[in-house]
Image (cartoon, rainbow, N blue to C red):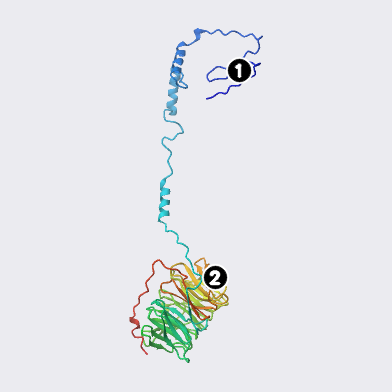
Amino acid sequence: MKIRSVNTPASSNKTQSRSPLQEPFLQRRSSRENLDRFIPNRSAMNFDYARYMLAEARTGKENPATVSSPSREAYRKQLAEALNMNRTRILAFKNKPPTRKETILTDFALATHEAKPSKPRRHIPQTSERTLDAPDIVDDYYLNLLDWGSSNVLSIALGNTVYMWNASNGATSELVTIDEENGPVTSVKWAPDGHHIAVGLNNSEVQIWDSTASRQLRTLRGVHGSRVGALDWNNHILTSGGMDGQIINNDVRVRAHIVETYRGHTQEVCGLKWSASGSQLASGGNDNLLHIWDRSMASSDSPTQWLHRLEEHTAAVKALAWCPFQGNLLASGGGGSDRCIKFWNTHSGVCSNSVDTGSQVCALLWNKNERELLSSHGFIENQLTLWKYPSMVKIAELTGHTSRVLCMVQSPDGCTVASAAGDETLRFWNVFGTPEVAKPAPKTNSEPFAHWNIR
């Protein structure tokens, strides 16, 4: 340790810097002050202790231990035993303090490594990838003039004629042209097998065709009192909805095809959709009503009572879509004075959410690969809107049609959407992207259709 010396003026008495273990320096206060001379008394000195101290100093040890008397040593020993002072350092860790467990970091690293990387944001083209002419399409909100079968063939009704467009090779063919007195065609719907198609007519009849052989198998007559604007299949049951407000289940395997009747609408039925399980049917009408029908409650002797009668829409209900990942979830869309998309729990009949879209809702489609919903609209924008479910945040708006988008269907792989509008165009949109693994088209037994040629 360095000790700083203090310099004083020459006129003053010099002072010596203090060092450890030295007695303090005594200054003479005055030359006239009388002090007794110090005469050491050697008889009082302990020369043995002095020699001991000198010997310890020569060994180079700092702070040598003092020699203690036997009584003091006994006291120290007793005190050490009482306080356990023979142990190692007080308030000190015997071992190294435990380090932070590495398992926390290890688990975090494993979780981070094993977690699936976030998907890159999907690019959604804002324009259609293909546009086809659709002349003479009937600009009628209540009709369903477009469908895409499981064999990747799209059908569209243009006036009195039903055309087929093969999406695999782009080939176009004509299926049937209806006489003027019976037309126009008011609805088309592919059977689950992708080879047979039902065609609803303005004269209340329903024709069933074999698209592969381009041959009519049978005609269902006496089903409705006026045009048939909505069709849907439930295995071998063809369900039809007419302007008369009736819904009929037709078993195409037998001659007496009318097996059940659903009565609940007072105006034209414009929307029909069976759930994926085939246990529930949703129907929408021009009377602003939405009905949920349970197949198990169907009766052939008397009209079937609805399971739920939902009256929240304030305009015609045409757009219907069952959720592919939640069997009891149904989305419905209202017409021009309603403009809302509503979500329903079809077990309880409760509306879980309602979103005002700002324009007429013409059709709804769920994305089979993501939790998204696509809606098509009428005036003013005539757009397709992609929504994130369940937040219902707009992801994209697809424009191009110059008139209301009447119909909208989905390709079998769930990627491409086709829309038909009053501007007489058919547009294809790559809006749902490409799935990681394309699901094969469902296979159905064609045996129930063997007797469709019953007249």
- The Cα atoms of the two marked residues, 2 and 1, are separated by 96 Å
Which residue, given by chain and number where applicable, does mark 1 sit on?
Answer: 15
**Amino acid type of the residue tagged 2 in the rendering:** Val
x and y, in percent, of residue 251 in the image: 38, 83
> Can you say which quadrant of the picture contains the C terminus?
bottom left
Dot 2 alpha-carbon crowd within 10 angstroms: few under 14, some 14 to 19, many 20 or more: few
When asked about the image quadrant of residue 303, the answer is: bottom left
Residue 121 or 454: which is nearer the viewer?
121
| Residue 167 visible somewhere in the drawing | yes
Residue 66 is left or right of residue 253, and the answer is: right
Which residue, given by chain and number where applicable, does mark 2 sit on?
Answer: 355
80 versus 260 height, above or below:
above
x and y, in percent, of residue 185 in the image: 47, 86
Badge 1 marks a residue whose secondary structure is loop
Q: Nearer the viewer, mark 2 or mark 1?
A: 1
Residue 104 or 11: which is nearer the viewer?
11
347 versus 237 height, above or below:
above
Residue 19 or 302: which is nearer the viewer?
19
x and y, in percent, of residue 418 in the image: 47, 76
The disc label shown at residue 410, or none: none
12 versus 151 height, above or below:
above
Dot 1 alpha-carbon crowd within 10 angstroms: few under 14, some 14 to 19, many 20 or more: few
In the displayed image of the protein, which residue is found farthest to the bottom? 181
The mark that comes first in sequence, 2 or 1, is 1
Mark 2 vs 1: CB contact within 8 A: no
